[in-house]
Amino acid sequence: MAGSQAARVARQLPVGLRTAGASRWMAAVTREEASFLGRLTGPDAAAARRVYADWLLERGDPLGQYVATSIALAGAPAEERARLRTALRSSRARVPPERLAPLEQPATLLVNPTPLGARWWGTDLREARPVEGTYESWPYASLPPLPLGALGSFSGMPCSGDDALHADLDRAERLLRAEGLALPGSFRRYFGAGGAWRALRSCTACWYHFGHPVPAPGGEGTLFRFYSDQQSCVHWYLFLSREGDHCVAAGKEPFDEALDPLEEEEEGEEEPLDDASADALAARLLEAIHAPAGPPPPRAEPRPTPVSEAWFVAPSFEAFIVRCWLENELWFKLSAREPLGPDEAAYLAHYR
């Protein structure tokens, strides 16, 4: 689609989707399809979504199965939801992310692919979105839309050299491969060559930490921790499924702590051992070395995570990083009274 036609298509979208870079993301969308997308936040949204699903299915478009399954899940009784979520994750995995993005913005997401409630955990945006403590959570549906053009390539984030967390990534992939899972390609790109991961400043001193895979609440997937608040207030996880799908979840606990405790170094100098204590310690070490090998210690098991202690926060790793980056940049720029970029200004306008 030519640039001018893509721009016309983008203008047919609801205001919540007409963000910077949208025309680039809509390049694969016909004007007829854009007209369906433009009705997904209006008064006839439910009917428009059903017609859109039929239109896609008639054309053999795999996105049609995703839309149809999301409609079925939204109205399903409790006993049917786990089966339909599995089907939804399977259909998501077959659709390119640029096709899913307009349907998974806060204003257009009908259901999320997990059994978790959908809430975003973040901090204040100064006076525009104040919080009483360090973090608060908001319903996902209440959030500003993301700039579609920044998704998928992290194109809005500056790179800083050729830093790659190769050792950590390789370890993470080995752990997940043992569970029959794989990291999303976007996760590897972000932490790989190019150093995009260094561009994410955190106003609450969050840090990257690759943990251990643990069962997700409800048993429908696996949680893999990758980001944590410095004071352990909130932790963020990849929610990975055997259907090849992923999204991002958050929790106030490090659910993998039993497998990967974050040990703190104690300050101060150790007391020197006297001769008798040193001899006793040496004797115990020699005894341990020459003792016959016994059975290995039992493997620590993480406690089951209740569904109420974790939340769906983003439909993809890309969406999480872009929103996290935008909110942190806004915090720093608002605090320093620096000028905002177009995407930042549009994001902030949602709260004013």
Image (spheres, rainbow, N blue to C red):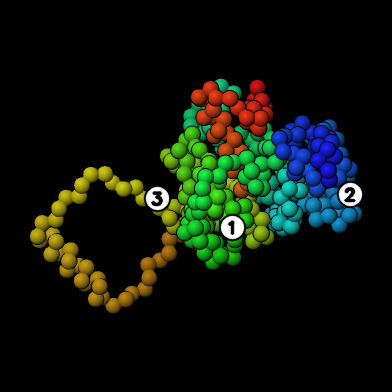
- Residue for badge 1: 183
Which quadrant of the figure has residue 103? top right
Q: Residue 55 got which mark?
A: 2
**Which of the two discs, 1 and 3, labels the residue nearer the N terminus?**
1
Q: Is residue 134 above or below residue 221?
A: above
Going by the image, does 278 lie left or right of 121? left
Asked whether residue 93 appears in the rendered view, the answer is yes
Going by the image, does 22 lie left or right of 124? right
Disc 1 element: loop
Q: Position of residue 13 (x, y in %)?
A: 80, 36
Disc 3 element: loop
- Quadrant containing the N terminus is top right
The kind of residue tagged 1 is Leu
Badge 2: residue crowd in 10 Å (few <14, some 14–19, many ≥20): some
C-alpha separation, residue under disc 3 versus residue under disc 2: 51 Å
C-alpha separation, residue under disc 1 versus residue under disc 3: 22 Å
| Residue at 21% over, 72% down | 287
**Which of the two discs, 3 and 2, labels the residue nearer the N terminus?**
2
- Residue for badge 3: 262
| Residue at 51% over, 25% down | 335
Camera-nearest residue between 108 and 149 = 149
Q: Is residue 288 above or below residue 133?
A: below
Camera-nearest residue between 239 and 297 = 239
Badge 1: residue crowd in 10 Å (few <14, some 14–19, many ≥20): some
Return the residue found at the far left. Answer: 275
